[in-house]
Image (tube, coloured by chain):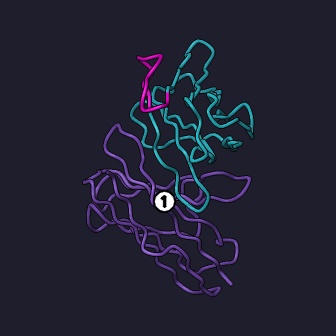
């Protein structure tokens, strides 16, 4: 089975903090993705990566950055957290041409 | 812009009956389609996929039908069980694109 693991299920941070969300996949997938999911807005793509050290902006990259130093790990960084970034964050990975597989998400609250 | 959408936001089904969840898409360039299931507090779980060179694909208790003429996708669940209660999303992608476009989701509730 595909396993996408997100480091935290729940996280509470303060406004202005730098926040790191980690994601690891064990299927040697080339592609990795970060989404946020909000009620009424569905899944929105923040960033994705199709190879180590490569990254592409998604639909809502503002306020976020990413890092992919190793194939299995994709990190999402909130440079200076704001309350508008309170959300459910979902990581996914996929092989070339195949379906995306998701982790169970990190519910992030910014106070 | 073009988007993927579902016909109904909610569906109530009697346990043991078959469920049909519908999805309409508008991007004629889409050639790969996926159904996901999301239970409360969990991430979306891959159910089944289908490519545009097929019009039907079957899995365990699930069947996906693709009608490219009317740009319609459906997921059929046989003998619906309480564990099938969840939100179901369709998603689509164009050839050589990495990104998926997701529908809003249909909430399926199974009545005992």
Position in image of residue B44 (x %, y %): 52, 51
Image quarter for residue B59? top left
Position in image of residue A62 (x %, y %): 59, 65
Image quarter for residue A80? bottom right
Image quarter for residue A39? bottom right
Q: Circle 1 marks a residue in which chain?
A: A
- Front one among A8 and A1: A1
| Residue shown at 53% from the left, 78% from the top | A79
| Residue shown at 42% from the left, 74% from the top | A7
Residue lying at the far top of the rendered structure = B69
Chain whose colour in the figure is purple: A
- Front one among B110 and A31: B110
Q: Is residue B12 magenta?
A: no
Kindly identify which residue carries mark 1: A34
- Quadrant of the image containing the C terminus of chain A: bottom right
Chain whose colour in the figure is cyan: B
- Front one among A52 and A30: A30
Position in image of residue B42 (x %, y %): 54, 59
Above or below B58: residue A76: below
| Residue shown at 68% from the left, 40% from the top | B106
SS at mark 1 in the image: strand
Q: Is residue B61 magenta?
A: yes
Query: How would you rate the neighbour count of disc 1 (Cα within 10 Å): few for under 14, some for 14-19, many for 20 or more?
Result: many
Above or below A31: residue B53: above
Position in image of residue A43 (x %, y %): 60, 52
Which contiguous range is marked in magenta?
A: B49-62
| Residue shown at 51% from the left, 27% from the top | B30
- Front one among A2 and A11: A2
């Amino acid at each position: 089975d595909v396993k996408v693991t997100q480091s935290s299920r729940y996280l509470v941070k303060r406004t202005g903090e730098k926040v790191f969300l980690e994601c690891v996949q064990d299927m040697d997938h080339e592609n990795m993705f970060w989404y946020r999911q909000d009620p009424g807005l569905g899944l929105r793509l923040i960033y994705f990566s199709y190879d180590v050290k490569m990254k592409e902006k998604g639909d809502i990259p503002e306020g976020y950055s990413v890092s992919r130093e190793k194939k299995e790990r994709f990190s999402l960084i909130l440079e200076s957290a704001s309350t508008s970034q309170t959300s459910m964050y979902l990581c996914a990975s996929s092989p070339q041409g195949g379906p995306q597989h998701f982790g169970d998400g990190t519910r992030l609250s910014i106070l | 812009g073009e988007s993927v959408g579902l016909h109904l936001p909610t569906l109530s089904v009697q346990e043991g009956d078959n469920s049909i969840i519908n999805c309409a898409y508008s991007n004629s360039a889409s050639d790969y389609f996926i159904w996901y299931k999301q239970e409360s507090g969990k991430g979306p779980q891959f159910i089944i996929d289908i490519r545009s060179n097929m019009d039907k694909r079957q899995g365990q208790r699930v069947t996906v039908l693709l009608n490219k003429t009317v740009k319609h996708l459906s997921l059929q669940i046989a003998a619906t069980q309480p564990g099938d209660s969840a939100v179901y999303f369709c998603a689509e992608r164009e050839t050589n694109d990495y990104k998926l476009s997701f529908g809003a989701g249909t909430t399926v509730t199974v009545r005992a």
